[in-house]
Image (cartoon, rainbow, N blue to C red):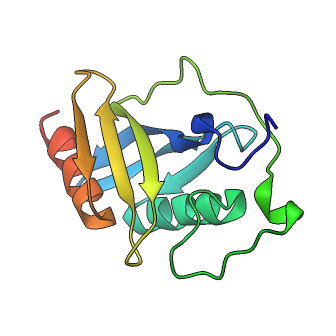
Amino acid sequence: MGDRAVANKYRDTVVCVDSYNERVMKGRIYNPFFDGSIKFNGLMSFILAMEELLDEMKYPQAYEQRRSFDAEDMYITDKGNEPTGVRGEQETFDVKIFYRQNASWQGTILWGKTGREQPFRSVLELVLLMNSALQKR
């Protein structure tokens, strides 16, 4: 049962921001479900990459999608390793998404450099929190 979709380690997605010029984020996304990194170039690229990752993992399931108890839908398998020691050149965030309700994400964000943790209730709030940390650089 170590491959269940509800395993806690899949909640942790490491977002490494390598550059932030004129409010455009560029970086990488790491998750134990995916082998290697997913690169993003801009806000829309980041959001779509995260959403695609969550959809592929089926965790957390989007509230608006039909759910099932089919065995294929209940398990996921590791494709990669837990990201340890990865860091962004500008900032590193540990994003935990607990729910996908109201066509958005709810969870917490942890700043890598300060250790500050903050809950967010939407993708917009997450992006604003990331922006506030990156503007201080």
* Total labels drawn: 0
| Residue at point 60%, 34% (across, down) | 9
Task: State whether residue 7 is above or below residue 67.
Answer: above
Q: Position of residue 86 (x, y in %)?
A: 53, 24
Judged from this view, the residue extending furthest toward the top is: 85
Residue found at x 72% / y 44%: 34
**Residue 69 showing in the rendered view:** yes
Depicted 91 relative to depicted 54: above or below: above
Residue at x 22% of width, y 21% of height = 114
The C terminus, quarter of image: top left
Residue 83: x and y in percent read 61, 27
Q: Is residue 23 visible?
A: no
Residue lying furthest right = 71
* Relative image position of residue 60 (x, y in whole percent): 56, 58
Nearer-the-camera pick, 71 or 117 = 71
Query: Is residue 3 toward the left or the right of residue 39 in the image?
Result: right
Q: Is residue 118 left or right of residue 85?
A: left
In the rendered image, residue 58, in percent from the top left (x then y), is placed at 67, 62
Q: In the image, is 77 to the left or to the right of 55? A: right
Image quadrant where one finds the N terminus:
top right
Q: Does residue 29 lie above or below 81 as drawn?
A: below
Q: Which residue corresponds to the image point at 39% horizontal and 63% vertical from the top-left?
A: 105
Quadrant hosting residue 111: top left
